[in-house]
Image (tube, grey):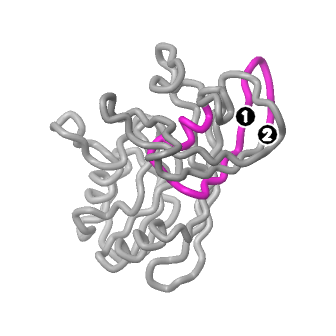
Amino acid sequence: MFDKYDASHLSIDVLYEDEHCVVVYKPSGLLSVPGKGPEKADCVVSRVREMYPECIEHPEAHRLDMSTSGILILGLTMEAKRNLSTEFRERRVGKKYEAILDGEVRGESGTIDLPLRLDWFNSPIRIYDPLQGKRCITLWEKLDYQDGKTRIAFDLITGRTHQLRVHSSHKFGLGCPIVGDNLYGTRNPGERLMLHSRYLKIAHPVSGEMLEFDRAPDF
């Protein structure tokens, strides 16, 4: 086991740890990896590296948007990072999200198959493009509807940047943006993006044992 010191001041919950990998809960508003400039240095990776001094420089195997909360797994060694990255690349990982959408979603469940690409003139926006877009597939199920808002469970088949945000908001998707989405909907002052990565199922990067985590959102 790696040496670990008391880093409770870093305010990041550890859901699982061993000498190979660590699973953490990322709160909304915290970067997954460092951004450009010292003001964007604080992130999941920097906190994990401070908590585990022997951790490799780039332990991230996947990321969540800054505004999205939820479960992240990081490799503490090169072997673990490489194996985890392979699992994500080959889509051998189970990922489920939960969100609250602004509006009433029609139907009870379904599949969204909507190809997306980067808007080259308006990064980081993603746009629908049936010719040049990368295929993006999302399974969805309605959980609840109250006061003009719909709670949705998402099962990601692919994991593209902003996939759920565009699949929610686009007229060819669910037609209702996620509450608090400043890019594809509306965010009121002090409001967070109501998108949460609640479930992760993945093989341990060294032993191969299946690891499974489920943490409900705080909204």
Residue 55 vertical placement versus 164 (above, below) = below
Which of these two is toward me, 169 or 213? 169
User: Disc 2 versus disc 1: distance between alpha carbons?
Assistant: 5 Å
> In the visual, does 153 lie left or right of 91?
right
Q: Where is residue 202 shown, x and y percent of the image? A: 55, 70
Q: What's drawn in magenta, residue-wise?
A: 142-168
Q: Where is residue 158 shown, x and y percent of the image? A: 55, 56
**Amino acid at dot 1:** Arg
Residue, disc 2:
143
**Amino acid at dot 2:** Leu
Residue at horizontal 32 percent and vertical 35 percent from the top? 120
Residue 187 vertical placement versus 45 (above, below) = above
Residue at horizontal 76 percent and vertical 29 percent from the top? 105
**Label 1 CA crowd tier, 10 Å (few <14, some 14–19, many 20+):** many
Q: Where is residue 75 shown, x and y percent of the image? A: 37, 69
Residue, disc 1:
151
Q: Secondary structure at mark 2?
A: strand
